[in-house]
Amino acid sequence: MTLRARPLKISYAYQQVAEEIESQILDGTLKTGERLPGEVELAELFGVTRSTVREGLRQLERDGLVFRPTPRTLEVTLPQIDKLASRAGRAMTLMNVSFRELWQVARQTEPLAATLAVECGTDEEIAELDALHQQLVQARKNIGETIELDTKYHTMIADMGKNRVLSLAREPIALLLYNGFHQVAPRVPQCFDRQIEAHGRVVEAIKARDAETARDWALRHIEDFWRGVNLAGLADQTPMINASKVF
């Protein structure tokens, strides 16, 4: 058993239990597939109560760092991209990041995602993306449905690029930024048609395997969204979303 012991004396010890085990997973001390000691042994190792250990383990389970192959055992695993992105998104929400901050990064990640989609996307994926765009056209003026489809559209393009680092980096940013659409749309009604046009142009460029045009239209799209944010007077405000629905 390679888990290092470290007594903990803090107000929220369960968080420190979770953070200590997490750090040992991420630095390689605890390997993927390795079974953790039981609650009694962990409590002795860290100098805390079983209930504290139990709550710390729940946190690790929620974060996707451990899982239960059986009800009584816990094994180390590595979190999937959606788990990591959710954690980053929650942190950004708590930090009250602004539209400006999100846009500054998205204008780099979204054109790159479109470029990689051209290079790596399969014909089947492109057809699925095209079908998703047609749903967006049909959802015009429906803000809730538009946001859902828009988020899926951008995520699909990123996934087509087969680059997990990009997917992990852009996902929480895009979720926050694009869910701010419900603040922009009522003040900038033309945004629906402009969004549909830009999406369509990107899809057509990907279908034609034209990386330059796909990248250019992806950038034009994110710049156009930024113009809408400014017209709505929201540049330095925080996107207002229900984080429980997004993350």
Image (cartoon, rainbow, N blue to C red):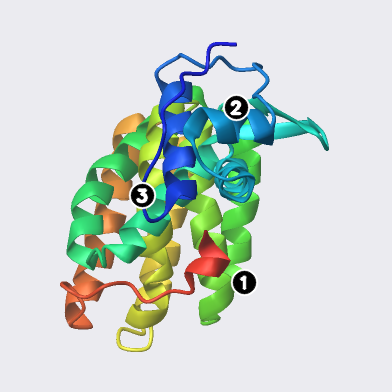
Determine which of the numbered discs, if any, sits on residue 138 in the image: 1
Q: Earlier in the sequence, mark 1 or mark 3?
A: 3
Q: Is residue 44 left or right of residue 166?
A: right
Which residue is painted at 33% across and 44% down in the image?
110
Which residue is painted at 37% across and 76% down in the image?
240
Q: Earlier in the sequence, mark 3 or mark 2?
A: 3
Q: Quarter holding the N terminus?
A: top right
> Eyeballing the image, is 101 above or below 122?
below
Locate residue 193, reporting x and y percent: 41, 73
Locate residue 179, reporting x and y percent: 43, 68
Determine which of the numbered discs, if any, sits on residue 10 in the image: 3
Q: Residue 210 falls in which quadrant of the image?
A: top left
Q: Nearer the viewer, mark 3 or mark 2?
A: 3
Q: Earlier in the sequence, mark 1 or mark 2?
A: 2
Q: Residue 100 falls in which quadrant of the image?
A: bottom left
Amino acid at the residue labelled 2: Thr
- Residue 140 at least partly seen: no
Amino acid at the residue labelled 1: Gln
Q: CA distance from mark 1 to mark 2?
A: 25 Å
Q: Choose between 74 and 141: the one closer to the eye.
A: 74
Determine which of the numbered discs, if any, sits on residue 122 in the image: 2
Q: How crowded is the residue under tag 3: few (<14 C-alpha within 10 Å), some, or many (20+)?
A: few
